[in-house]
Amino acid sequence: MNKNPEYPKKKFLSAQIDLSKFAPATEEEKRQQDVMSESVTFFKDGMRRLFKNPLAVISIVLLSIVILTIIIAPMIVPYGYEEMLSVNGRRDKGAKNLAPFEYSEAEQKFIEEGGERFPHIFGTDEQCRDYFIRVVYGTRISLVVGIFASLIVLIIGMLIGSISGYFGGKVDLIIMRIVDIIYSLPDMLIIILLSVVLNEAIKFKPGTILADLGSNMISIFIVFGCLYWVSMARLIRGQILSIKENEYILAARSIGAKPGRIIRTHILPNCLSVIIISTALQVPSAIFTESYLSFIGLGVKAPMPSLGSLANAARSGLQSYPHKLIFPAIVICLIVLSLNLLGDGLRDAFDPKLKK
């Protein structure tokens, strides 16, 4: 029997819901529902899953330590990356190829007389320069090259991949044939040719950043911008080809939205997982490319160091001073491994198909 007069009486054999069996939710139940249905953005949800991955967390910690070291160390260590060691204003010729935490005879005498000398954490090189600060600056160069090259690849690949995937037809056909041609070009040969041409044709003003980097590094950036974007473009093109068939894209077109707005507002946000993952995995690839190019002499211009050029310089004294190769090699392995593990963690966290 319906005890509440506000509710209409349920008729016999009627499919009508008996409202008398329901009661309004209490304030406590409403607050509980608000907590249970808390909205979470795509980025926040991905970061929450990322920090549950122990390997990704370890990678973030290691990368943070490396980045803090290369920022803080030049403020503490009183040596420059191209500074030859001196004592009392005189060049210390005995400070050649010192072992880690070892002082030369002149430095030991200076310390015995009451002077203070900052220790050589990684020793010195064959030109009496502190090796630790050179590894620090070499790490800076390698990381900057990796990040900057990845940004170039991201911008060009995202732009061309979006145009190719959205417009399709002849536009897609022409762009994909250009991509196939670029895939067939030997990047190493182009870097060598560009280095020779830039070195002969362009003279950079001494003291500028371009002069310090040299024509080899500029040619590497040009090759990254011209050749290495094709994989990113293909990934984004494939995502857009499937996304643009959805109903909300048709709805955006029907109300007169321009292609640029549709790509920027509706399509690219749905490709965010692919973009984040590909960019994160491109950074270690660029660092490794720069390292082996510097190892064969196609990297930064001396005396500016990079991890690859330091490893190359250490080959001549490998049997006598193995630590000079071990230190840059460990830093390269640490950075590349951490970035690869972080990229895998980002893929697991942000790829919707891998959600459990």
Image (cartoon, rainbow, N blue to C red):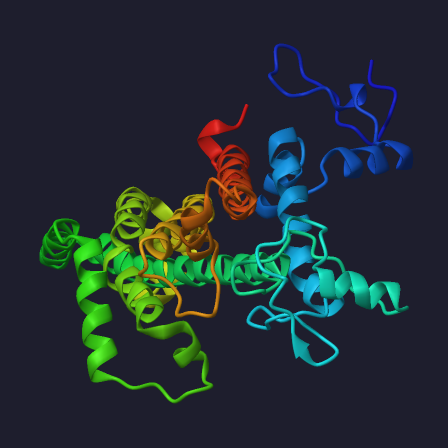
Question: Residue 139 location, x and y as percent?
Answer: 54, 57
Q: For the view shown, which residue lies furthest in the top direction?
A: 13
Above or below 338: residue 177: below
Relative to the observer, which residue lies in front, 57 or 309?
309
Relative to the observer, which residue lies in front, 254 or 70?
70
Q: For the view shown, which residue lies furthest in the bottom direction?
A: 205
Quadrant of the image containing the C terminus: top right
Direction from residue 152 to residue 342 in the image, left or right: right
Relative to the observer, which residue lies in front, 41 or 27?
41
Above or below 95: residue 279: above
Question: Residue 27 location, x and y as percent?
Answer: 90, 37
Above or below 83: residue 105: above
Q: Locate residue 198: give its quadrant.
A: bottom left
Quadrant of the image containing the N terminus: top right
Question: Residue, x 59% and y 73% (percent of image)?
Answer: 83
Question: Residue, x 38% and y 58% (percent of image)?
Answer: 154
Question: Residue 334 location, x and y as percent?
Answer: 55, 41
Relative to the observer, which residue lies in front, 273 or 187?
187
Exactly how many numbered labels are in the figure?
A: 0
Q: Is residue 121 visible?
A: yes
Q: Is residue 256 visible?
A: no
Direction from residue 49 to residue 341 in the image, left or right: left
Above or below 72: residue 316: above
Question: Residue, x 35% and y 54% (percent of image)?
Answer: 251
Direction from residue 183 to residue 296 in the image, left or right: right
